[in-house]
Image (cartoon, rainbow, N blue to C red):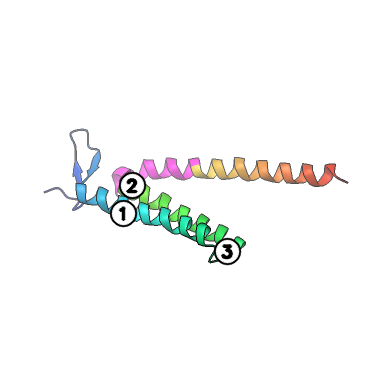
């Protein structure tokens, strides 16, 4: 048995999940996909609330997939992977947010 209860460590020191962790991750991901689909198809929430719910569930699904499939956790071995992921996410947010902001301002200023 390894030091981590839900991970097995390979020869290269990389962490591999168990079949149980993959099945649990798959079930949680499937549920997090089915809920937004149901919300849209049934129209149980107002449009704006549905969009917010979909974004929240998508963010939760990203975390679930990072933990269960990419095996990112708080261990010291994963620290660089987590830092590189956070850096990439920040760059994407800046680039996408900045692009949307510029396009919005161009659209607003070009019409007047």
Q: Residues within 10 Å of mark 1 (few under 14, many from 20)?
A: few
Residue 42: x %, y % from top left: 51, 62
Residue 72 image label: 2
Q: Which of marks 2 and 3 precedes in the sequence?
A: 3
Q: Residue furthest right?
A: 112
Q: Nearer the viewer, mark 3 or mark 2?
A: 3
Which residue occupies the foreground of this view, 56 or 76? 56
Residue 30: x %, y % from top left: 36, 52
Residue 101: x %, y % from top left: 70, 46
Which residue occupies the foreground of this view, 74 or 23? 23
Q: CA distance from mark 3 to mark 1?
A: 25 Å
**Quadrant of the rendered structure where residue 27 is?**
bottom left
Residue at the image point whose x is 78% and y is 43% from the top: 107
> Which residue is denoted by mark 1 in the rendering?
27
Residue at the image point whose x is 14% and y is 48% from the top: 2
Q: Which of marks 1 and 3 precedes in the sequence?
A: 1
Residue 49 image label: 3
Instruction: Report helix, strand or loop for mark 3.
Output: helix
Residue at the image point whose x is 37% and y is 47% from the top: 66
Residue 19 image label: none
Q: CA distance from mark 3 to mark 2?
A: 30 Å
Whether label 3 touches label 1, CB < 8 Å:
no
Q: Residue furthest left?
A: 1
Q: CA distance from mark 1 to mark 2?
A: 18 Å
Which residue occupies the foreground of this view, 90 or 59? 59
Instruction: Report helix, strand or loop for mark 2.
Output: loop
Judge from the rendering whether residue 87 lies leftward or rightward of residue 107; answer left or right. Answer: left
Q: Which residues are magenta?
A: 69-88
Majority secondary structure in the magenta region: helix
């Amino acid at each position: 048995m390894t030091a981590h209860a839900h991970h097995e460590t390979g020869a290269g020191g990389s962490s591999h999940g168990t079949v149980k962790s993959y099945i649990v991750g798959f079930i949680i991901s499937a549920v997090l996909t089915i809920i937004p689909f149901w919300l849209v198809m049934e129209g149980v929430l107002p449009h704006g609330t549905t969009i917010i719910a979909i974004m929240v569930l998508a963010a939760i699904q990203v975390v679930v997939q990072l933990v269960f499939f990419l095996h990112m956790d708080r261990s010291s071995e994963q620290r660089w992977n987590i830092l590189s992921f956070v850096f990439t996410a920040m760059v994407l947010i800046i680039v996408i947010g900045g692009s949307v902001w510029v396009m919005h301002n161009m659209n607003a200023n070009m019409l007047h």
